[in-house]
Amino acid sequence: MSTTIIAEPQQLMPAYNPIKYIIDNTNKNEPGFRYIFTIYSATGSHIPANVVAQYKVLPAFSTGYGEQDISKLMQSLVTFDESGIGTLSYSVQESWYQYDVDLGFEFVDKKTYTNSLLISGVNVQIVTTAAHGFILGDQIVITQADGGVANPALEGLHTVISVDSATAFTVNLNYYTNITDAAINGFINYADNRKTITLDDELVIDKEVFNGAFNLFINNGDNNPFNSVAYLGTSGTLLMTSNPYPQSFAPSTFVNALFYYNLRVYAGDTYTVEWYDMDSNPLDSQTFTPAADGIYAVFVGPTALVAEDYIVQIYSASFASELYYFTYDNRCTINDDQLIYLDRMGSWQSFAFQLKTYEKGQITREQYNQHIDGQVVSTEWVGVQLQKGFRTYNTNVTKTFELNTNYMDQTDANRFQELLTSPQVYYYSVDSNKLCACIIENNSFEVFRQRNKNLIKQSVTIRLAQQDPING
């Protein structure tokens, strides 16, 4: 193999972080050289029909390495899945993708000759240092070491008129009238700059991505950049959420709160979700067994048996997560509204809006002024009471809600910015028992700090993602 891997992503990577491969190749100084990165689904064969994407990359100017970031491609292959919100746990295969990469290269096909030029009949015969692969009628370009000074007629375009052996062939040039120095070396390539292509010089298999974006500042429970080992297999201990696990960062939860943390699961393993009180006494539990490898969204909010500060742990025969802490908010409420949002690591979190909620609507109308026919009474035109001049032909209503939080601690104040910037948000009202897609209207925010403001509360304006249909 002529390809060497200089750098590659970890086994499991967030799709919205750089996913860069850097490789080197011993042929990088050949004419027309390109590195080739071919992406396949890990479940398919490495055949052209199964290619997801292919990139041909010039060597980097400073190092000669081939560098390719495939994060944009991976982002198009993963998405969110809200279909199981309201259940205990569900598969989110759309949030996870497993792929292979073939690392290869291409360059202009070049054959070298170093032996003296020979005679075949009356024409020039060339003997290459390795098998040439030419056939009768091929158009070739000959480049001599001296630039064609001694044998100018041999320099440039010629046709192969006979193939004499694996390393010898004859071109359409009279030896006796055109060759003055038979000992000058040179090289040959196809006239159409045909290339030698190797697609699978080095293989990378079973890499994984998920619908996440890791940020060290936001994921403040981790002291190092993203480490896939912490989320995989028997050595993993972390769930795929931007909420850190230590007790000092416990988010607030509440009755009917919908929290779902993502977990990398393996087919056939039975996983147990255990709720404990703050003295480590069991409160509730559930189990599930995935049918295939991938990611599960696991409910970690309070159940009917949990109405206090609590701890959640997920474990199987070969896996045990960290203990994730939650503080239970049992204050009296005016409204029991909540927004469920997609966090940076692809899990679903919930935020309570327990104070006053204001529902408003904005109406737009389109009208035109039409002719009024009226009627003739006793030879005099008079109007008709119910006929219209101005007619409304298109009415739209856009509903917005202003939601207000209760007072919160610093952890929830930090979480609030994630809610405001999340692209996927759902509004849930206990009164209506409906989950509605919505859009955050706020375009700016301030992260309050308890050192500056002891009593922190926030408000948000949302717009329902579906308009009320109006007949006419």
Image (cartoon, helix red, strand yellow):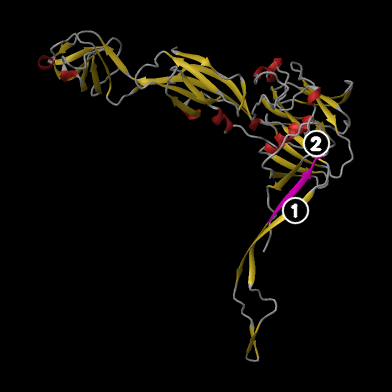
Q: Secondary structure at mark 1?
A: strand
Q: Is residue 255 left or right of residue 33?
A: right
Q: Residues within 10 Å of mark 1 (few under 14, many from 20)?
A: few
Q: Is residue 187 left or right of residue 445?
A: left
- The residue at 73%/55% (across/down) is 361
The mark nearer the N terminus, 2 or 1, is 1
Q: List x then y, in percent, for residue 404.
A: 79, 43
Question: On the image, which quarter does residue 183 sit in?
Answer: top left
Nearer to the camera, 142 or 250: 250
Q: Main secondary structure of the magenta part?
A: strand
Q: What's the residue type where badge 2 is placed? A: Ile
Residue under label 2: 456
- The Cα–Cα distance between marks 2 and 1, rounded to whole angstroms, is 25 Å
Residue 327 marker: none
Residue 437 on the magenta segment: no
- Residue 71 visible? The answer is yes
Nearer to the camera, 260 or 336: 336
Q: Secondary structure at mark 2?
A: loop
- The residue at 49%/21% (across/down) is 102
Nearer to the camera, 42 or 34: 34
Question: On the image, which quarter does residue 84 sit in?
Answer: top right
Q: Quadrant of the N terminus?
A: top left
Question: On the image, which quarter does residue 216 sit in?
Answer: top right
Q: List x then y, in percent, for residue 133.
A: 30, 17
Q: What's the residue type where badge 1 is placed? A: Lys
Residue under label 1: 360
Foreground: disc 2 or disc 1? 2
Q: Is residue 174 left or right of residue 319?
A: left
Q: Which residues are magenta?
A: 397-405
Q: List x then y, in percent, for residue 6.
A: 51, 14
- The residue at 13%/12% (across/down) is 180
Q: List x then y, in percent, for residue 244.
A: 74, 24
